[in-house]
Amino acid sequence: MSTALTSAQTRFLRGMAHGLRAMIQVGGKGVTDNLVAELDLALEHHELVKVKVSGAEREERDAMIAELAGRTGAALVQRIGHTAVFYRQSREHREIVLPR
């Protein structure tokens, strides 16, 4: 269950993500259960997370990014090259207030 974002919300989140550094890196093993759990925890604490995805083929990277978004219930805010930005509203402590 992915979060649907409006274009204004996506622009707002892209601006917030500009200064972020990648918190998680997908390595040679691909998307594992531990990686998904780590991303889930990072999304719960930060709501907006940058992920670096390694992969030789663009299609392979796209598949990994889609899998991460699907398994965590996060919205893909932006994808540039090997870097993807995910957003999911925190259940416990919401910090980011999205524009309407």
Image: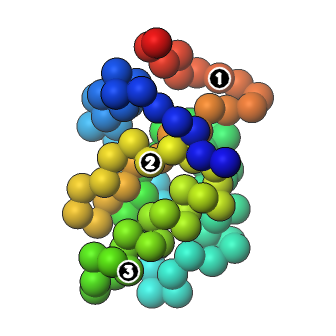
Q: In the image, 28: left or right of 17?
A: right
Q: Position of residue 31 (x, y in %)?
A: 56, 76
Report whether 36 appears left or right of 92.
Answer: left
Q: What's the CA distance linking mark 2 and mark 1?
A: 18 Å
- Residue in the picture at 68% in, 71% down: 34
Mark 3 vs mark 1, CA separation in Å: 33 Å
SS at mark 1 in the image = loop
Residue 63 image-quadrant placement: bottom left
Q: Which residue is mark 3?
A: 60
Q: Which secondary structure lies at badge 2?
A: strand
- The local secondary structure at tag 3 comes to helix
Q: Taking 13 as reference, is 58 left or right?
A: left
Mark 1 nearby-residue class (10 Å; few <14, some 14–19, many ≥20): few
Q: Which residue is mark 2?
A: 76
| Label 2 vs 1, first from the N-terminus | 2
**Gap in Å between the C-alphas at discs 2 and 3?**
16 Å
Q: What residue is shown at x 28% (from left), y 86% (from top)?
A: 56
Amino acid type, mark 1: Arg
Q: Nearer the viewer, residue 96 or 65?
A: 65
Tag shown at residue 72 = none
Choose mark 2 or mark 1, whichever is in front.
Answer: 2
Are dots 2 and 3 in contact, CB under 8 Å? no
Marks counted in the figure total 3
The residue located at (27%, 37%) in the rendering is 18
Residue under pointer 1 = 94
Amino acid residing under circle 2: Leu
Q: Residue at x 24, y 56 (%)?
A: 80
Question: Residue 46: x percent and y percent?
Answer: 56, 37
